[in-house]
Amino acid sequence: MPLFLQRQINNLKKMLLNLGALCEEQVHRSIQAVVSRDVELAQKVIEGDKQIDLLEIEVEEECLHTLALHQPVAFDLRYVVAVLKMNNDLERIGDHAKSIAAQAKYLAGEGEVSEHPFDMNAMARRVEQMLRHALDAVVNIDVELAHQVRVLDDEVDIMHASMYGRAIELMRDHPHQTEQMVHYINVSRQLERIADHACNIAKDVLYITEGEIPRHGRLRRELAAEEQADADETPA
Amino acid sequence: MYPTLTILLAVALVGAGVTALVWRSRIQKLKAELSEQIEHGRKLGQRLTVVERRRSELEAVLASMVEGVAAIDTDERLISLNRAAARMLSLDPQRAVGRPIQEIVRNASLQSLVAEALGDQAQQPATQELTLRLTPGIAAAPGNTGSPEASASSTDDRAIQAHAAPVRDASGRRFGAVVVLHDVTRLRRLESVRQDFVANVSHEIKTPISAIKAAIETLIDDPDMPAGPRENFTGIIARQAGRLESIIEDLLSLTRLEQENASADDSILPHPVAPVIRAACETCQAKADAKSITLDVKAESLQIPVVASLLEQALVNLIDNAIKYSPENTAVRITAHRRAEEAVISVADEGRGIEPEHLPRIFERFYRTDRARSRQLGGTGLGLSIVKHIAESLGGKASVTSQLGRGSTFTLTFRLAEEVTSAATQPKAADPAETV
């Protein structure tokens, strides 16, 4: 590989990981703001999102530069394309963190609810772990770890789905807390979205190594099977 | 013919002589140079040993430092780090060295700090306080990236103060940066505890003091006050002074608890529960009688590793509370029984109960469910906090359940003696006479 391209790709990786670190921190702090009802911290998270947005643009431009100037092929091309996509996912994660912080600001101003509709700490821990694993997978292009992230995503999805029932029950029991419940539901949804983005990042790692897009695997397999069936039928 | 030969010979002789002379001086010069070289080599060897020794000295100093030190080159790659830094950043030095800082430590503030120190205008060392989560990073020691539970226990936030300074070589060219990490978690935690505490204490102490002040000022302003109102004011002063006293007493016992907590951990021996409960009931009997409340004790004979005086204080606080919040002619039930591996001591009253929203915070210092009411009953806001503190210092737990209108039950849970002391005081715990 040409030295310049290698250097450029290393640089891209550094920038992406820098963005990743920022996002991890934002997510962590936003959840902390909800749990500890800390308006100041929530405000900090909301302001911190600007930095992520700026960094996202920077990474994107750097990717485009790399593509235009070095015309990478094979692994390098996949890497740059994956960075472009992960960059996008990370920025969205930042947005979700900001949104959680906004909920935190509201919730801190209201009375404490009698019971949370979901175990926020457990869910947050899983989401943070997914994000961490996903970024770790990016660092080492670790396929094993990337697969783990996808497993964790199922857990988070289940947690999110079971939250709705509990929230509705709680709303019925404590009608005056309905507004807070709606905000907690929102927090849960944002967490679930963050988990999805982390999962996307993990899938991009798989794409870098395997060169195959792992998304919508079942759908595409079905399509392929149909085509195969069609092909089998025509000669007969 | 001869003269020619003679001349030739003479010339040859002269030439040989000259050559010999030249060579001799040259050889001498070489000899001198050689010995100089040898001397130089010897000196160099000496210098090398000195340098080597310095280096190992330096390494020893770095390794034994409490502060973490890491060196980073201009490409933001890790050159080296000492043991403390490896621990703080949870890195495996062998796998971390040579990799970019972004890959091994995913902490945005640390990354920006390093970038700042490596930047063009970095002259002074930059300082920043970071929050590091001790999560196993990518280059962490193997076996740490397990289940969520395994890593959850290590997700404590650490407050780390980091200094980064550019490093220059002899010619003043910058070739990297050094980051010094200082763990200030304990310090920050203590600071925040102190701040909360001071805020609460000053609030609680200020209230009686301002009442006393107001009463005294009124008395001074009006020396000819009739006896009735005067008594009223002196009554206020007496009551508020009593309040102040009890707050200070509680504070002192909390402080004492904290100190004992730090010192006596292993020295806790198994102790029977029943006599402690009896002693606590005796202390509260007078107050109970005043409200015609019966203290109903049902204690199994259990052995738990506690300091008797502390447990008694906790129970007195709980029973005293129960009496305070119970209507007249009711009963306060104190029970001690075994549940699985644990000893459960509970104090249940038939009072008005506690609203569910207060339950999670009721053990906090100075937390009140109903400010006006509990002051009126003479609470300091510290009683339950003391109970919780005692329970925890004895390795147990304090919890509460309550039903509005039906009463509340405060429960202390301790591990049974056999469990805790199985290793240290085996013969004692195994003695059937002791455990039954």
Image (cartoon, helix red, strand yellow):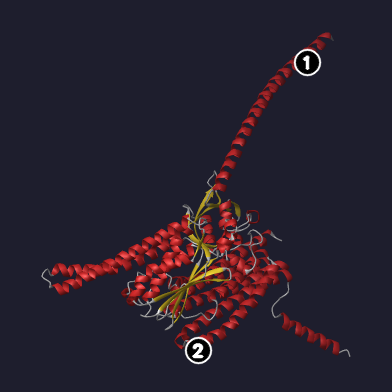
In the depicted view, which residue is nearer to us: B23 or B209?
A: B209
Q: Specify whether residue B374 is in view.
A: yes
Where does residue A131 sit, x and y in percent of width and height?
Answer: 60, 70
Q: Quadrant of residue A106?
A: bottom left
Could you tell me the amino acid type at mark 1?
Answer: Ala
The residue most toward the right is A236
Q: Which residue is mark 1?
A: B12
The answer to the question of whether label 1 and label 2 lie on touching residues, with beta carbons closer than 8 A, is no
Where does residue B397 sit, x and y in percent of width and height?
Answer: 50, 68
Q: Which mark is residue B111?
A: none
Q: Residues within 10 Å of mark 1 (few under 14, many from 20)?
A: few
Q: What element does badge 2 sit on?
A: helix
Q: Residues within 10 Å of mark 2 (few under 14, many from 20)?
A: few
Q: Is residue B383 left or right of residue A63?
A: left
Q: Is residue B382 left or right of residue B85?
A: left
Could you tell me the amino acid type at mark 2?
Answer: Arg
Q: Residue at x 57, y 67 (%)?
A: A19
Quarter of the image for the N terminus of chain B: give it: top right
Quarter of the image for the C terminus of chain B: give it: bottom right
The residue most toward the top is B2
Where does residue A97 sit, x and y in percent of width and height?
Answer: 53, 74
Q: Is residue A105 left or right of residue A62?
A: left
Q: What element does badge 1 sit on?
A: helix
Alpha carbon of mark 1 to alpha carbon of mark 2: how far? 127 Å
In the depicted view, which residue is nearer to us: B55 or A232?
A: B55
Where does residue B143 sit, x and y in percent of width and height?
Answer: 66, 61
Q: Which residue is mark 2?
A: A172
Q: Quadrant of residue A8?
A: bottom right
